[in-house]
Image (cartoon, grey):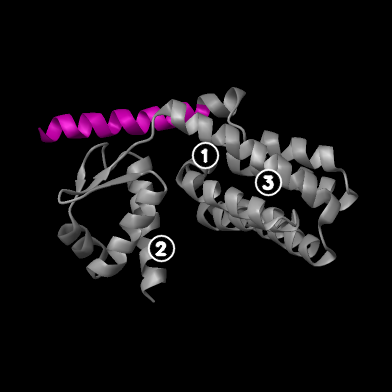
Amino acid sequence: MHNRRADGVREALEQMIVTGELPDGERLDEVSLADRFGCSRTPLREALHALAASGLVQLIPRRGAFVRHPGLEEMVEMFEVMAELEALCGRLAARRVTPALLGALQATVIACEEAVAAGDHDRYYAENERFHLLVYEAAGNGFLAAEAGRLHRRLKPFRRLQLRLRGRMAQSLAEHRTVLSALQDGRPEAAAEALRDHVAVQGGKFNDLMASYRRSSLHAGSETALRA
């Protein structure tokens, strides 16, 4: 029960940080946050530790937890590594995927289609996450899957932010279909290229994400100035 509650609090805090509602350097008061989320301090502390592991919170002994906004360069570097890890997963998965995992991947694509039709960003992200985790599993390399999953979790709030950009959800779905087709046909290089392009923040996707992230940071800065 605590784990599910902590996950909910973590997701809420992630969005508050990424969208700029919680500005860089702000101290996170456990008492007020527990009251805000209607939870005890145990799941809240679990959420803060998870956010610290993802780099969005800094825990300082005897001082508390503080919001940490990753710099643009750091974020782009993480996406660069994520794109190559996913490409490797796709390459291996195209050779090793089982019929059962192919069926599960097809099911997530259908669920993503339904989410796009409904304009449901949250459902789409949940199915999108499942799609990627299934690709990691299909690669048949436990160490690679664990490393890819770890970085995926760290980038989760920013990948979710991407999906709220105009037209990105439908574009993401089209990219999932391309990946699935390459896996079904057993084309390792096509799967690798499709996943690399899907994850990498290049060209227009890079500019859109950076603009959105900057707006969040500027909004946070102006709110802080108004409170000062």
What amino acid is found at the position of numbered circle 2 in the picture?
Answer: Asp
Label annotation for residue 173: 3
Label annotation for residue 185: none
Answer with the quarter of the image where residue 35 lies: bottom left
Q: Are marks 3 and 2 in contact (CB under 8 Å)?
A: no
- Magenta region: 208-228
Crowd rating for badge 2 (residues with CA inside 10 Å; few <14, some 14–19, many 20+): some
Q: Which residue matches tag 1?
A: 162
Name above or below for residue 150 compared with residue 99.
Answer: above
Q: Quadrant of the N terminus?
A: bottom left
Q: Position of residue 61 (x, y in %)?
A: 20, 50
133 or 151, which lies in front? 151
Q: Which residue matches tag 2?
A: 7
Q: Position of residue 125 (x, y in %)?
A: 55, 53
| Residue at screen point 22% across, 63% down | 34
Q: Secondary structure at mark 3?
A: helix
Residue found farthest to the left:
228
Horizontal relation, residue 143 to residue 12: left or right: right
Whichever of callouts 3 and 2 sits on the residue coming sooner in the sequence is 2
